[in-house]
Image (cartoon, grey):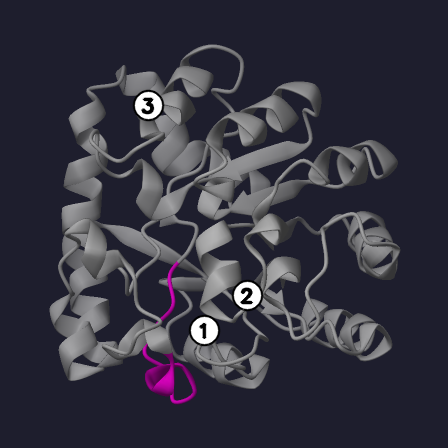
Amino acid sequence: MIIDMRLRPPLKSWKATAQFTEGTGYYPSRMGMPRPKSVQTQSVDDLLTEMKEADIMGVIMGRQAPRPLGIIPNDEITEVMRQHPARFVAFTGIDLRDIEAGLEEIERTHRAEGYRGVSIEPGASFTPMHSDDKMLYPIYERCQELDLPISITISGMLCTMVGNDLAYGSPTPVAKVAKDFPKLKIVISHGAWPSVMPMIEVAFMRENVYVSPDLYINGINTPGSQEYIKAAKSFMPDRLLFGTAYPSRPLKESVEAFRQWDLSAELEDKILHRNAARLLKLE
């Protein structure tokens, strides 16, 4: 089964956000990416049908961000995982306005079935920060202690969607975090696109950094996408992860677009399944 490292189902709180509306915050349409049918119906059942057709298990990346991204309560995520345990696992979304509360939320959800990591979006938070901000270090430390991977979503596009400066989309500060927490597995969601080469530099330097470019790798004509693939073919075959960023793009279409890379069977299997299965302890 393919593991999709960034899938956001049409939960109650997500339906009002830019991801499920045609508001100005939605940008993949500019890149010619079609809308899935289940986004139009905003139906979890329709999404499950699409997941079955694409042979996908989804990793729900929790989110606690300003509008138009929005706050998605982790309890909503818990409920959909409870109802469909074979299709969903999740990373706990943390509101970075209150680090102590965030640590408590990590402890609470860590004991709940289905949670496999922690998700933060520093550059798109209410008060933007770089990933090596010392305020975030207690979160990194706790994740390292619990052996929980952390997803740091880094993308200039995401920063600007909430009105923050494009500079917060730089992946360079991740190198310091990875050095300071060498046993912490760090997933860079959105692959820091469009800062592709700086992202590859960080991943080359730090072997505890995983790259999940999601929609930016699913198409041979996406600017920068070839560099992620080159990295996977050379030094990073075990640390590149597949994702769709649904609802930004349909699931089956995303898988088909990824397979246009015509990779070896072994490398394709690693990116689509084995790397994530090992990271999430699903093996």
Q: Nearer the viewer, residue 138 or 66?
A: 66
x, y percentage for residue 229? 37, 22
Closer to the chain start, of discs 1 and 2, is 1
> Mark 2 touching mark 3, by CB under 8 A?
no
Count of residue discs: 3
Residue 81 figure quarter = bottom left
x, y percentage for residue 114? 55, 65
Mark 2 sits on what residue?
Answer: 114
Query: Which range of residues does the magenta coloring cover?
Result: 7-17
Residue depicted at 35% across the width and 56% down the height: 245
2 vs 3, front mark: 3
Q: Is residue 80 above or below residue 252?
A: below
Q: Is residue 173 above or below residue 140?
A: above
Residue depicted at 73% across the width and 71% down the height: 96
Mark 1 sits on what residue?
Answer: 81
Q: Is residue 134 magenta?
A: no
220 displayed left or right of 277: left
What crowding class fits label 3: few (fewer than 14 Cα within 10 Å), some (14-19), or many (20 or more)? Answer: some
> Mark 1 touching mark 2, by CB under 8 A?
yes
C-alpha gap between disc 1 and disc 2? 7 Å
x, y percentage for residue 141? 86, 52
Q: Is residue 222 above or below residue 43?
A: above
What crowding class fits label 2: few (fewer than 14 Cα within 10 Å), some (14-19), or many (20 or more)? Answer: some
Residue depicted at 23% across the width and 50% down the height: 55
Residue depicted at 51% across the width and 71% down the height: 162
Amino acid type, residue under disc 3 in the picture? Gln
Q: Secondary structure at mark 1?
A: helix
